[in-house]
Amino acid sequence: MRSLITILLLAACIVSCNKDQDSSLREIENRSNPDSTRSASRNLSNEFKDYWYSGVAEISSYDLKMERYGEIREGTAVMIFVTEPFSVNENIKTDQNEDSNRSMLKLNATRDFYTGIYPYKIMSSTFLPLSSQDNAVKVATSIQEWCGHTYMQLDKTGDNFEGVLNSYFQGEGNQNLKVEAAILENEIPLQLRLGPEQMPTGKMNIIPSTEYLRLTHKKLNAQAATANLATTDSTFSYRVDFKGGRKVTYVVGKKFPYEIISWKEEFPSLEGMSTTTAVLRKTLKTAYWQQNSNKYSVLRDSLDL
């Protein structure tokens, strides 16, 4: 009986904590911008707040076709968007209510596929401030496969990104990283959710995605690029052309919440033009962190996973 009471109390606490977090995020938006001396505040619409501060995450699954070792591999990609309170002092999601906290739109992006007998599992987490018109302040990426694994993290500190690279490759080893701050390619899906027509266009410097840097073993630096926004009756298409021939394109819905319908990456490689595509399967809005019981496994069917 005591065990049952304990479980019920814990469940009530979880629900309460998530409601408190939702309220906390709305409170953070009403505070003055901690970086107001450097960046203007974002004018978030009520429609945006109602959608993203509803206490649930948006999860979308994609059909993935990814080139690796000169062959196309079929797999699954997932994008998880959720708002979270973020500690400016520790540069991480916070459970403490502090005046310096900022509201973030976070993207957890995964890719899973097989190369012959062994699997690849890739995940990145990117944090974009919602209280001010800043670029992303953090990205962390891990890649696991049977040969070994790598981990790369970048944190914005002043006018730079600083971070670490830990890799099983002898030529990469363990490194401390530093690069002048610029737009992160990893934040493009997040920026698109705020409104495609707000996206930067023209010539600019962009730090390539951490997934691309690790899979190709490229050094960290900002690259010259040109971005363009095109429209059709039902979609926006945002394309970035990097110097050297690499291209990245995102297609999103024309109306809010600007769902990401597909994305494509192309770049020259030793095997020719390497191409990766992802096309939307299903989308589900749910508080997945409360659904780790076996009874919730059926929800994977809702995402076609």
Image (cartoon, grey):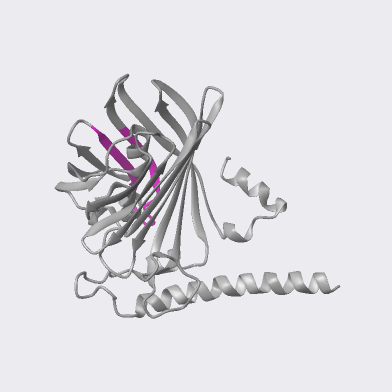
Quarter of the view holding residue 17: bottom right
- The quarter of the rendered structure image containing the C terminus is top right
Q: Is residue 248 magenta?
A: yes
Q: Is residue 196 left or right of residue 38?
A: right
Left or right of residue 19, residue 196 in this image: left
The magenta region covers 246-265
Q: Please state which of residues 151 and 38 is positioned toward the viewer in this rendering.
A: 151
Q: Is residue 223 above or below residue 34?
A: above
On screen, 180 above or below 23? above
* Residue drawn at (61%, 45%) of the image: 300
The relative height of residue 73 versus residue 142 in the rendered view (above or below) is above
Percent across and percent down for residue 289 are: 58, 59
| Residue at 53%, 76% in the rendered image | 20
Q: Residue at x 41, y 36 (%)?
A: 278
Front in this rendered view, residue 286 or 78: 78
Magenta stretch, overall SS? strand
What residue lies at 41% left-to-right and 58% top-to-bottom? 106
- Picture coordinates of residue 10 (x, y %)? 69, 71
